[in-house]
Image: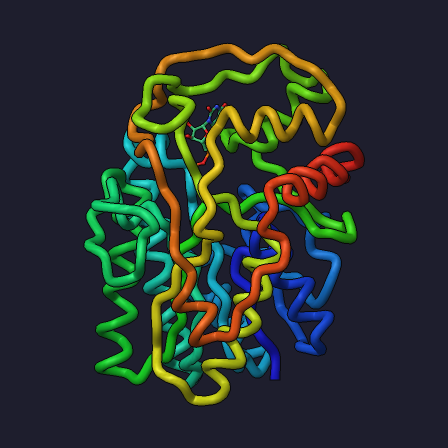
Amino acid sequence: MAVLVCGGAGYIGSHVNKQLYKEGYETVVFDNLIYGHWEAVKWGHFIQGDLKNLDEIEAVFKEYNIEAVFHFAAFAYVGESVVKPEKYYYNNVTNTLNLLHVMKKYGCNKLIFSSTCATYGEPERVPITEEMKQNPINPYGASKLMVERIFQDYNKAYGLKFVVFRYFNAAGADPEGEIGESHTPETHLIPLVLDAASGKRRDIKVFGTDYATPDGSCIRDYIHVYDLATAHLLALHYLEEGKESNFFNLGNALGTSVLEVVKTVKKVTGRDFTVTLAERRAGDPARLVGSSEKAQKMLGWKPIYGDIDIIVEHAWKWHEKAEY
Ligand code: UDP
């Protein structure tokens, strides 16, 4: 039996692939390499393919006896999703339907899926819990919410068993330094601040300093990618034990402001750099912090790298020797 990791050449998928492999699973990474990196697939089998092509998905199910599927393959640039919604709905929704179609055809009914806190939109309160109203404010979040709904209908009609994770801000890198975060274009705060620290950028812009937060900058819940990956393995065990489909937030319930991240990077790297206070970025909620009590209780998940200093340390270690 093997497990399929769609989008396993990407940031979170590659970290999950490593942990699955180390735990003894035969893994098959399927990735179109539009945003993923072949260099990140250091474990298991690799097939370059695209979820838009049913025959390419089917070829994988013919070759391997797939017991469960991890689905990370999505476009995830919020800003781009606003101007190119078609790209997001095709890739994130239609292509997921293709994957579900082939899974159903081959009798594979276990799915672990990457959703996002962007499905909540502007939260009524923090920390956000799973039963709170989901009201996405951009097509990216909406595409993920649509897929969440599809899973529920497939669960009732076809017996699909799923675990959906709503991630907060994935950050950090493999503690052993073998893989890490690399996006082109890069829009995420921590890699950009590290670029400023290493002199690859002239400065870091802080988007908005007039939010209703203690220091005026936005607060996010940074969660170590290693801890995120661990939760996925627990989710697989949970489904293997025959438990019911479920939705879980993955965050730290700890808020860190943009200015605090900048300060931490200066401390951890020992480098100074220019910080420019800039206008707000459109569509940014002031504060996004998630409660993961449900995942801790029901999956037995125990994040071990909650400290922002460690997250930045691991990210910096990778940043300084990144292979891709
Ligand atoms: N941010 C910033 N400068 C940057 C990039 C991001 O001030 O160059 C802020 C952004 O406005 C948000 C936070 O950092 O408040 C985290 O942004 P990121 O894009 O990393 O993740 P998001 O929360 O949007 O998923």
Front-lying residue, 227 or 113: 227
Q: Residue furthest bottom?
A: 242
Relative to 149, is 223 on the left or the right?
right
How far from the left and from the top, in percent, is residue 199? 71, 16
Q: Which residue lies at the image location 59% right of the left edge and 58% below the top edge? A: 227
Image coordinates for residue 98, horizontal then vertical, percent:
36, 64
- Is residue 269 visible from the viewing direction of this image? yes
**Residue 195, image quadrant:** top right
Residue with the most extreme front position = 214
Instruction: Kindly identify the residue that appears in the image at 76 percent across and 39 percent down.
Output: 317
Residue 181 location, quadrant: top right
Residue 53 visible from this viewpoint? no
Q: Quadrant of the N terminus?
A: bottom right
Picture quarter containing residue 315? top right
Camera-nearest residue between 207 and 240:
207
* Image quarter of the C terminus: top right
Q: Position of residue 123 (x, y in %)?
A: 25, 44
- Where is residue 224 drawn, in percent x and y? 59, 50
Vertical order, 67 against 18 (above or below): below
Question: Residue at (65%, 38%) from the top-left corner?
Answer: 312
Q: Image quadrant of ligand 1? A: top left
Q: How is the image coloured?
A: rainbow
Number of marks in picture: 0
Which residue is at the front of the view, 167 or 151? 167
Left or right, 149 with reference to 170: left
Look at 53% across and 29% down and name the residue there.
260
Residue toward you, 117 or 269: 269
Taking the image as shown, residue 242 lies to the left or right of residue 320, namely left
Vertical placement of 168 versus 281: above or below? Answer: below
In this picture, is 199 found above or below 76?
above
